[in-house]
Image (cartoon, coloured by chain):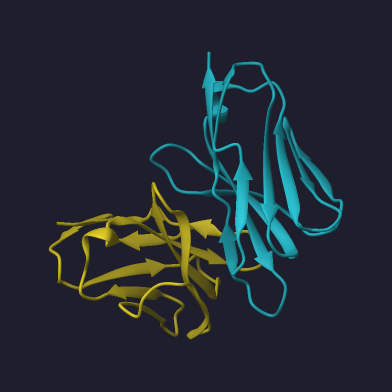
């Protein structure tokens, strides 16, 4: 079945450093979504990418969707302590259904 | 606008019992999905409902079942509980695009 892997599993940075997490799917995706889950919380939707090669920015966050629509990345510039949490990518496979498969997640720790 | 509401928030059950969890989606959202979250397995897809029909199902045993009502509210049921069923069960609703998650039901099986 469809699998979505993320690397790294865990990243510890000093506040102000940049952070990147990478997401790879075993199958081509119709779109990819990114979520953030704070410790003790639930996933919160950040963004959806649909087009091959698409790049979107949200303030310090930059999201990319690969040309082959099988990989994606999230880059955070100048991390802040409020960025702490687990970042998940989630892919929707092709076809008529909306089955959203979550990646393994990257836990980001930010040291002040 | 109210978010996704899940009840109960916490539940403790004994092995062998059954449990029913409830999810009320955002008004107007017809798609409801359920996920199981554990530290070891991450977020695992259980099933998705749309207009009272199960549209997708994950790789869980038949002890896990669900349904959706005409008002889009959804329930999931787990029968013959096992210790390994202890997890955070998350419900999410969607209109188009991103999913909005509820706060989840923390199920502990003892």
Which residue occupies the foreground of this view, B22 or B2?
A: B22
Q: Residue at x 32, y 55 (%)?
A: B87
Left or right placement of residue A94 versus residue A89 in this view: right
Can you give x and y, in whole percent of width and height, for residue A57 in the image? 78, 39
Left or right placement of residue A18 versus residue A9 in this view: right
- Chain in cyan, by letter, is A
Quarter of the picture holding the C terminus of chain B: bottom left
Camera sees residue B19: yes
Camera sees residue B3: no
Q: How many marks?
A: 0
Q: Residue at x 33, y 69 (%)?
A: B22
Q: Residue at x 62, y 56 (%)?
A: A4
- Chain in yellow, by letter, is B
Q: Is residue B69 above or below residue A17?
A: below
Q: Residue at x 42, y 43 (%)?
A: A41
Can you give x and y, in whole percent of width and height, for residue B12 in the image? 17, 57
Can you give x and y, in whole percent of width and height, for residue B2 in the image? 46, 58
Image-quadrant location for residue B83 = bottom left
Which residue occupies the foreground of this view, A47 or A8?
A: A8
């Amino acid at each position: 079945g469809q699998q979505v892997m993320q690397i790294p599993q865990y990243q510890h940075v000093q506040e102000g450093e940049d952070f990147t997490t990478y997401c790879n799917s075993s199958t081509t995706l119709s779109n990819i979504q990114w979520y953030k889950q704070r410790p003790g919380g639930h996933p919160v939707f950040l963004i959806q990418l649909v087009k091959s090669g698409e790049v979107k920015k949200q303030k310090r966050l930059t999201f990319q969707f690969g040309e082959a629509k099988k990989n994606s990345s999230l880059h955070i510039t100048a991390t802040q302590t409020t960025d702490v949490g687990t970042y998940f990518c989630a892919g929707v496979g092709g076809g008529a259904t909306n089955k959203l498969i979550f990646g393994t997640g990257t836990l980001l720790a930010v040291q002040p | 606008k109210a978010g996704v509401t899940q009840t109960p928030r916490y539940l403790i059950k004994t092995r062998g019992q059954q449990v029913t969890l409830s999810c009320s989606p955002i008004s107007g959202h017809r798609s409801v999905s359920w996920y199981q979250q554990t530290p070891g397995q991450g977020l695992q897809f259980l099933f998705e409902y749309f207009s009272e029909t199960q549209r997708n199902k994950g790789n869980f045993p038949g002890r896990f079942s669900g349904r959706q009502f005409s008002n889009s509210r959804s329930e999931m049921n787990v029968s013959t509980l096992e210790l390994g069923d202890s997890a955070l069960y998350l419900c999410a609703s969607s209109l188009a695009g991103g999913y909005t998650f509820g706060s989840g039901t923390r199920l502990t099986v003892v």
